[in-house]
Amino acid sequence: MKKAHHECDEELIGRYLDGELSRKEHDRISRHLKDCSSCQKILQDNQAISTVFRDNLEREVSQTDFSVLETRALDQIRQKENPWWERITKLFFSNKLLIPATALAALILFFAITRSPTTISGPSAIVEAFSGEVSSVMIIETPKSHQTIIWYKETS
Amino acid sequence: MVSNKADEDLWNEERLVALLKEGHEGAFRVLVREYQEKLFNIACGITSDREESLDIVQEVFLKVYRHINTFGERSKLSTWLYRITVNECLNWHKRWKRRFRQQHQPLEMDEGGYLSELGTDDFAPDTLYQEKEFEKAFQEALKGLGKNARTVFVLKEVEGLSYDEISGILKIKRGTVSSRLCYARKNLKKSLEKYLDKDQSK
């Protein structure tokens, strides 16, 4: 069932303000508004909240640097065009990294050739050893920390 | 790099879309320049957050660049862009709670967080306090609308779109646009009643 259009209809006043009424309806509401203070108030309030909302937005826009947005958007599509593996390859072969990378490689090569491989510490050095009929004694010194260990064993 | 002259030549929707489909960077720049402010206004109206709106708009442009081939040209480019923007904003709705909490700044402070200096033109205790209080009340009222009514209200107020255009963007009936808009206005006015009455009694 079609809704009856009563003139004091807030939705109708809203559509009047938005220019969404037919010519006939528009004229009827215009005539009604001249005599209806409550509908005049609805219209004024609608206009007031519209103004406040737009003013708030305008303030936000005036504080926004859109050139940053443009730069960011363009950077992003360029990144999409160059996938991450291509960017890494480019980075490694770019002049910026070529010299430090070559120097680092040369250093690694130099130390690999000139330094003797690290030897695993062998058994401790035996400084002195005695072996008798009753017991045996061994004096051992650790190679790095030079700690002396005395090993004693009774012979049965 | 495309010159400004070339940029102007690109501004023909059909030609722009064709070039975007070819991945033309100059065309993309034209698109960004033409729509960034409009999309930002919509995003900012819905989210009430400048920084987040910038991120949303950036994401919209990226989506447009990626999916321009799916744009069928049956609708206007602007309708498609607005629809993507609204969807992006609504996808961010989970953050609304946090966003509105952050906006609760002390009324006495200005945007930089400083008190206006006594004896200067900026210091007008009544008006300053009332403006800040009104702004806060307005944001709260917008928040209270809910995403459906809020989105329709923003599209109407920001871009002055017709009910048919809004109905096309949101894929809802024209009558729904009208009723949501009426609901939004009615509720905003109800929340701001004391300020509106005060303003009109002057």
Image (spheres, coloured by chain):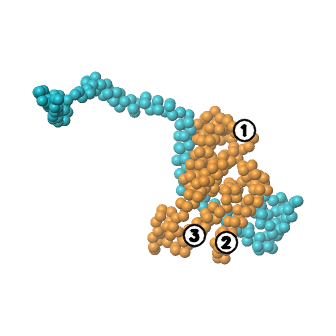
- Colour in which chain A is drawn: cyan
Residue where numbered disc 3 is placed: B133
The CA span between labels 2 and 3 is 13 Å
Quadrant the N terminus of chain A occupies: bottom right
| In the image: residue B109, left or right of residue A144 | right
Where in the figure is residue A131, as x and y percent of width and height?
Answer: 12, 26
1 or 2: tag closer to the N-terminus: 1
Where in the figure is residue A134, as x and y percent of width and height?
Answer: 12, 30
Rendered residue at 78%/63% (across/down): A11
Q: Which mark is residue B72?
A: 1
Where in the figure is residue B123, as x and y percent of width and height?
Answer: 49, 72
Residues indicated by labels 1 and 2 sit on the same polypeptide chain: yes
- Colour in which chain B is drawn: orange
Rendered residue at 56%/57% (across/down): B98
Q: Residues within 10 Å of mark 2 (few under 14, many from 20)?
A: few
The CA span between labels 1 and 2 is 45 Å
Chain identifier of the residue bearing label 3 in the image: B
Rendered residue at 60%/48% (across/down): B57
Q: Residues within 10 Å of mark 1 (few under 14, many from 20)?
A: few
Q: Which residue is at the front of the view, A76 or A132?
A: A132
Q: Residues within 10 Å of mark 3 (few under 14, many from 20)?
A: some
Rendered residue at 61%/35% (across/down): B24
Is disc 2 placed on a helix, strand or loop? helix
Where in the figure is residue B36, as x and y percent of width and height?
Answer: 60, 48
Residue where numbered disc 2 is placed: B193
